[in-house]
Image (cartoon, rainbow, N blue to C red):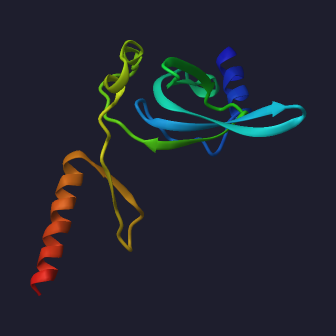
Amino acid sequence: MSQEIIRQVEARTKKENVSKFAIGDTVNVHCKILEAGKERIQIFNGVVIARSGGGSREMFTVRRVVAGEGVERKFPLLSPRIAKVEVVRSAVVRRAKLYFLRDRVGKATRLTERRVERVVDENKPVKLKRGKKAKAAKAAKREQSNQEKKD
């Protein structure tokens, strides 16, 4: 009974244009803020260090360093106060929670960037290739361009 009620409430609060991002991504979170009766958008940028909860209760934590001081903010994923979440860059991570970044200072907080190559074909939609597939696609592209130069 209670599960059914929760499902109905979650169905009402469902947001259609939820951005896809992962742990370790550097994101710009566009927050709506009310000041003196006017609404404006403030951007909070940082690294996503955690995601928790599920459904309408899902939250994500974004961390950034301001003037040498670490600042973390938790945002509800489906909040109407969040205009959009824009991914600036993706990183390779091997953890679900990046709380170890709290203890690091300076260059040690940098995460290895995930290389993403877009493969465009007239008949198929845009696909993202990562890792070994991206290297193979890049090598094939390089080989094709070498063949064109020879001809």
With 78 as the anchor, is 88 left or right in this view? Answer: left
Viewport quadrant of the N terminus: top right
The outermost residue toward the bottom is 151
The outermost residue toward the left is 150
Residue 42, picture quadrant: top right
In the rendering, at what x and y percent does residue 18 appear? 59, 41
With 80 as the anchor, is 125 left or right in this view? Answer: left
**Residue at (39% x, 40% y) in the render:** 90
**Residue at (62% x, 25% y) in the render:** 75
How many numbered tags mark residues here?
A: 0
Q: Is residue 2 above or below residue 93?
A: above
Residue situated in front as seen by the camera: 140 or 15 = 140
Residue situated in front as seen by the camera: 4 or 114 = 114
The outermost residue toward the front is 67
With 139 as the anchor, is 4 left or right in this view? Answer: right
Residue 43, picture quadrant: top right
Does any portion of residue 80 appear in the rendered image? no
Does any portion of residue 129 appear in the rendered image? yes
In the rendering, at what x and y percent does residue 118 appear? 35, 59
In the rendering, at what x and y percent does residue 102 appear? 42, 14
In the rendering, at what x and y percent does residue 110 appear? 34, 29
The outermost residue toward the right is 37
Viewport quadrant of the C terminus: bottom left
With 99 as the anchor, is 35 left or right in this view? Answer: right
**Residue at (59% x, 27% y) in the render:** 55
